[in-house]
Amino acid sequence: MIRSMTGFGSSTREKNGVHFSLEIRSLNSRYFKSQVRLPEQIQPLEAELDARVTARMQRGSIVVAARYANSPSVDDGSVNSTLIQRYLDSLRGVVGLDPDSITVDAGTLLSLPGVIGHNNSTKPIEEAKPVLLDMLEEACDKLVAMREQEGRVLEEDLRTHCRDVSEQLTHIEKRAPALVEAYQEKLKQRISSLLDDINQVAEGDDILREVAVFAERSDIAEECARLHAHVMQFNGLLDGDGAKPVGRTFDFIAQEMLREANTIASKCLDIDVSRRIVTIKGSIDRIKEQVQNVE
């Protein structure tokens, strides 16, 4: 089972008149990175929440945003009038600003950093910590569930493309031996036609030597075997338990699959083989696109 890297989860709580809300979002990223955004009153909890996210997620760009709001009846906040005066003095000191023309919105003033204080600065943190940690676990569960749901869709699509690669490759392997025979017959006809004009007869050893060189140069058995092995390895990872991230491994295998397909195309110039290689490369390109979203 594989998981997508995109997902969303949320959770809300109400405790002792305090409303909590938390959201977690995940987007595609080659590596893991997380960012936790908390209100000023509970910012010291960022490190602990980040550690919990890191323990749950292994790849993707994760953003956690939480909100914390006291109801007026339980708010223990106080207004720092001294700090407000400093803000106003600084505003009046702006060059070119007429002090008499200054109008200040009270709501804007109260939203400035540090204006609203708390009589006990540790109380919000102590109350919020267990609630936020529990909410984070719930939101992560929802995020993982969404990732797994999208992962099932990705898995089905990837299996389809791998199956297409295998089917086309099987046709190429069946076609390959006939290419040498066709080249030998064509070479005989061409040489005979040229030598008839000068009344000469082609030596059988010369023709066999040329055919042997062609057979060695156009031998694709090794490339076909490796491409089959890559497809089997890819399917084996799809059958895994999803305990470890496999996205980057998928990306590497897809690169190797494309490498083998290009080698087959360069060594075997048969029209039918070339047409099937185009189909194979198209499937591999779609695989490469899809695995960019796999954790």
Image (cartoon, helix red, strand yellow):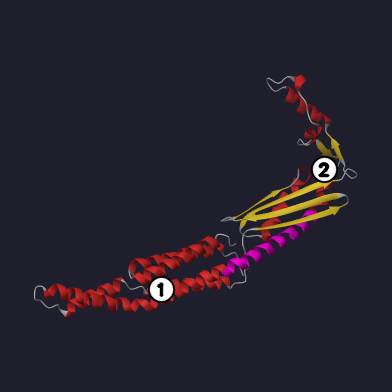
Q: Give the range drawn in magenta.
A: 130-156
Query: Distance from label 1 to label 2 (Cα)?
Result: 68 Å
Q: Residue 121 carries which label?
A: 2
Determine the residue positioned at 75% across, 53% down: 22
**Looking at the image, which is closer to me, 281 or 108?**
281
Determine the residue positioned at 63% across, 58% down: 6
User: What secondary structure is found at the residue carrying circle 2?
Assistant: loop
Q: Which mark is residue 224?
A: 1
Where residue 272 appears, as percent x and y from the top left, is 37, 72
The quarter of the picture where residue 236 lies is bottom right
Q: Is the magenta stretch mostly helix, strand or loop?
A: helix
The quarter of the picture where residue 220 lies is bottom left
Q: Which residue in the rendered view is the most extreme toward the left?
A: 199
> Is 151 part of what is drawn in magenta?
yes
Where residue 161 appears, as percent x and y from the top left, is 51, 69
Where residue 158 appears, as percent x and y from the top left, is 54, 68
Quadrant assignment for the C terminus = bottom right
